[in-house]
């Protein structure tokens, strides 16, 4: 349900997802109703100029409370997190940002009576003993990255707050997200973004994953659609209060390279797996998102060929300064 009286805070608004989600929310609710917040000022002009922006460190509870008092938020999208690859370099920092950040948001939600919260989870909640094909909604979860552990703990925490305090918290387990507007930062799936940039620049791409490493992925328009559909679905449809499995496609580096070569035949890829190979190897290859399909009619629009065409078209326009 959409109310134009809603006042929304997007934390992590300069990130890969936040940058686009903030603009979508502004289209729906009105520019002034959506406050973008991040730890640093945005590089994207559109983001800074289209509506209010606040510098915010999610660990700063007092500043969070001040902002909530000033703006009277009714909804929060808490997107700030350290991702999987960066997380392995700074485990304790990652745990602090991801867990303390979430705790601060949940407490603020309780204190201020905020009506609805969105918090993203990830395929990283799964681990080496999870079934890797058509990974079900409910299954073995033994993540072995600090990012995955923080997301799984976060899921349990969200469900606990939803059940115990009746908070309306909604969440999706995103697969790797691919987009051309804002770059991802520090994930294991980032190669699938970088590869398109290199292809359009006409330079060879060295992949840090092995050629047959399959991972679940999604094009940004589908991620935006899923997030907004979930948040706008009637409360009684939201039966999962941990986080919903979600997917659009699965491919390997060799397959994405082949799909690029259909447009750019001279594109070259080489493989030099590094520490991220082990992270990828602990995650599912394909995801069963039938519960999301049943509960709120989830359906993606983009497969690999359609995404490749759109990515190349848009990156070429950007390169030409259009
Ligand atoms: N894209 C994320 C990562 O690679 C997974 O959620 O860390």
Image (cartoon, helix red, strand yellow):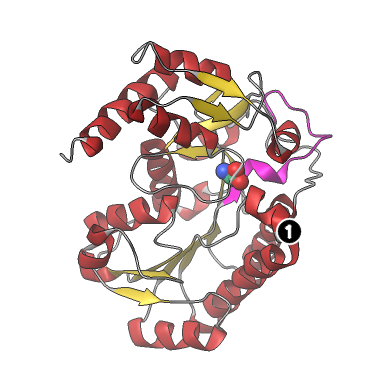
Where is the C terminus found, in terms of image quarters? Answer: top left
Q: Mark 1 points at which residue?
A: 153
Instruction: Kindly identify the residue that appears in the image at 57 percent across and 37 percent down.
Output: 189
Q: Is residue 150 left or right of residue 54?
A: right
Q: In which quarter of the image is residue 312?
A: top left
* Residue span colored magenta: 121-135
What is the x, y in percent for residue 46? 23, 58
Q: Does the magenta stretch include residue 133?
A: yes
Instruction: Kindly identify the residue that appears in the image at 26 percent across and 66 percent down.
Output: 48
What is the residue that sits farthest to the right in this orientation? Answer: 129
Please say whether residue 242 is visible from this viewpoint: no
Indicate the secondary structure of the residue bearing disc 1: helix
Q: Is residue 187 magenta?
A: no
Q: Quadrant of residue 33?
A: bottom left
Instruction: Kindly identify the residue that appears in the image at 64 percent across and 29 percent down.
Output: 209
Q: Which of 46 and 303 is in front in this view?
A: 46
What is the residue that sits farthest to the left in this orientation? Answer: 322
Instruction: Kindly identify the residue that appears in the image at 71 percent across and 50 percent down.
Output: 148
Q: Is residue 27 left or right of residue 96?
A: left
What is the x, y in percent for residue 237? 51, 47
């Amino acid at each position: 349900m959409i109310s134009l009286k809603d006042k929304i805070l997007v934390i992590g608004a300069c990130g890969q997802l936040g940058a686009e989600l903030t603009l979508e929310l502004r289209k729906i609710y009105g520019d002034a109703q959506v406050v973008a917040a991040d730890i640093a000022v945005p590089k994207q002009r559109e983001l800074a100029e289209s509506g209010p922006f606040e510098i915010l460190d999610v660990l700063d509870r007092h500043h969070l409370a001040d902002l909530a008092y000033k703006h009277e938020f009714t909804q929060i999208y808490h997107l700030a997190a350290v991702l999987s690859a960066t997380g392995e370099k700074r485990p304790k920092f990652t745990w602090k940002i991801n867990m303390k950040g979430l705790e601060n948001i949940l407490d603020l939600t309780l204190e201020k009576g905020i009506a609805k919260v969105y918090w993203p989870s990830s395929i990283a909640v799964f681990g080496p003993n999870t079934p890797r094909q058509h990974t079900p909604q409910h299954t073995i979860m033994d993540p072995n990255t600090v990012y995955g552990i923080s997301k799984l703990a976060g899921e349990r925490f969200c469900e606990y707050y939803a059940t115990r305090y009746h908070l309306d918290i909604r969440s999706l387990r995103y697969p790797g997200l691919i987009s051309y507007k804002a770059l991802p930062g520090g994930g294991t799936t980032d190669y699938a973004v970088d590869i398109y940039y290199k292809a359009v620049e006409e330079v060879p791409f060295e992949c840090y994953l092995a050629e047959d490493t399959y991972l679940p992925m999604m094009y940004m328009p589908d991620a935006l659609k899923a997030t907004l559909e979930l948040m706008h679905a009637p409360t009684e449809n939201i039966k999962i209060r941990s986080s919903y499995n979600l997917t659009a496609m699965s491919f390997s580096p060799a397959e994405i390279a082949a799909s690029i070569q259909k447009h750019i035949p001279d594109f070259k890829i080489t493989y030099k797996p590094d520490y991220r190979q082990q992270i990828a190897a602990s995650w599912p290859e394909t995801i069963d998102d039938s519960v999301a399909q049943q509960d709120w009619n989830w359906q993606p629009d983009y497969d690999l060929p359609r995404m490749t065409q759109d990515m190349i078209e848009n990156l070429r326009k950007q390169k030409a300064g259009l």
